[in-house]
């Protein structure tokens, strides 16, 4: 591709700089839907973040003690990578995912795609990203890259992280190559249209039923509704053994409500997905499920608020209150997903 054709395709090129100028950054709260949503917008597919999360069959739960974190990880979604796989399948898109252990090859592969005008999704450990104000090791983070120069990579991340951001090429290489839980070998991915159109009216019920089946059949007891119930007792152990109650529960509360890992944010997204789906399909079970998740989302926010109170007061009574609410959430989510599985 010569410079003239690059210019005509909406790209700006210099000897050591490439920016995809006709970028339409996705405005999202959750990292993987934000990155994948940005790739979709380049294909002129405009869907809301709740719709992407729902089509990604994204609702889940995990409580996990990771060696890389000083406190337990509370996750409210299915495992990394699978969300985008589900979106691509339900929208009949071609998803290409590649990994390599070579840092140099990893960058050359992405650079070649950007030079051809292709926005690329990246999987990263956000600890190394310089625009994170409170860095922590989490290797299941996603961003879309749309340009670079001699020193920096230009990314689309969540609105909490600044939306259109930059980080040095060195820091990006470290973020892509980091090892540990949820990490991949410099993973990157692209999306392309296929010769098959997608039909939301067919894709939505399929995604809902698939998500319900997955959620209701957890392989181990720290996943799904069973994991939420287990968390109700695990947080008591955590309170009694924590070496830094203030930081542990403050950080967890922020992650759960805002940063796209824990319960509250994802329940809000799933609630809104069900609302959009009911408006389109008028299926009664979807409406009942949506109403259930209105309450469930509020309960998750209550848990977050209690974690914040634990952080400020170190008072055990707030942990006991959070434990009781988690037991209730476990039961309510199980019932809601059983209902949705019958559509």
Image (spheres, rainbow, N blue to C red):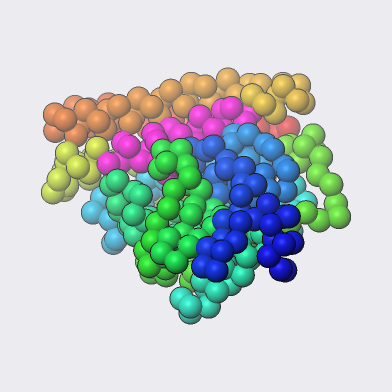
Q: How many marks?
A: 0
Find out whether residue 230 is within the magenta segment. Answer: no
Q: Vertically, is 311 above or below 175?
A: above
Left or right placement of residue 94 versus residue 212 in this view: right
Find out whether residue 261 is within the magenta segment. Answer: yes
Q: Vertically, is 105 above or below 33?
A: below
Whether residue 143 appears in this view of the structure is: no
Q: Residue at x 73, y 32 (%)?
A: 343
Quarter of the figure with the N terminus:
bottom right
Q: Position of residue 138 (x, y in %)?
A: 37, 56
Q: Residue at x 81, y 40 (%)?
A: 199
**Secondary structure predominantly adopted by residues drawn in magenta:** helix
Q: Position of residue 246 (x, y in %)?
A: 17, 39
Question: Residue 114's image quarter?
Answer: bottom right
Q: Residue at x 33, y 31 (%)?
A: 304
Q: Position of residue 143 (x, y in %)?
A: 50, 52
Depth check: give the residue in front, 66 or 215.
66
Region of the chain picked out in magenta, as a range: 251-274
Question: Residue 273's image quarter?
Answer: top right
Q: Residue at x 28, y 61 (%)?
A: 67
Depth check: give the residue in front, 140 or 332.
140
Q: Position of residue 309 (x, y in %)?
A: 21, 28
Depth check: give the residue in front, 38 or 140.
38
Whether residue 304 appears in this view of the structure is: yes
């Amino acid at each position: 591709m010569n410079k003239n054709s690059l210019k005509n395709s909406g790209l700006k090129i210099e000897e050591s700089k490439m920016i995809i100028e006709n970028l339409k950054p996705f405005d999202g709260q959750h990292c993987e839907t934000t990155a994948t949503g940005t790739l979709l917008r380049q294909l002129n597919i405009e869907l809301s973040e709740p719709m992407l999360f729902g089509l990604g069959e994204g609702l889940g739960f995990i409580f996990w003690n990771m060696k890389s974190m000083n406190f337990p990880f509370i996750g409210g979604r299915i495992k990394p990578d699978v969300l985008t796989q589900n979106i691509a399948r339900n929208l009949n898109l071609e998803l290409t995912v590649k990994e390599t252990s070579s840092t140099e090859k990893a960058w050359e592969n992405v650079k070649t795609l950007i030079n051809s005008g292709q926005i690329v999704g990246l999987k990263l450990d956000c600890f190394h990203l310089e625009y994170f104000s409170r860095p922590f090791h989490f290797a299941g983070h996603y961003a879309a890259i749309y340009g670079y120069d001699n020193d920096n990579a230009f990314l689309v991340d969540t609105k909490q992280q600044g939306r259109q951001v930059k980080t040095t090429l060195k820091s990006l290489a470290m973020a892509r190559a980091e090892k540990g839980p949820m990490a991949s070998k410099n993973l990157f991915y692209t999306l392309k249209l296929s010769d098959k159109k997608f039909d939301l009216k067919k894709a939505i019920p399929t995604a809902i039923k698939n998500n319900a089946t997955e959620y209701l059949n957890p392989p181990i007891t720290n996943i799904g509704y069973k994991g939420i119930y287990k968390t109700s007792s695990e947080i008591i152990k955590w309170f009694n053994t924590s070496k830094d109650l203030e930081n542990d529960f403050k950080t967890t509360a922020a992650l759960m409500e805002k940063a796209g890992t824990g319960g509250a944010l994802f329940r809000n997204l799933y609630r809104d997905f069900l609302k959009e789906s009911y408006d389109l399909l008028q299926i009664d079970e979807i409406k009942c499920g949506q109403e259930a998740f209105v309450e469930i989302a509020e309960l998750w926010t209550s848990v977050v608020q209690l974690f914040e109170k634990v952080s400020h007061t170190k008072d055990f009574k707030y942990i006991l209150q959070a434990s009781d609410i988690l037991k209730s959430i476990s039961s309510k989510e199980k019932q809601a997903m059983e209902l949705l599985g019958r559509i």
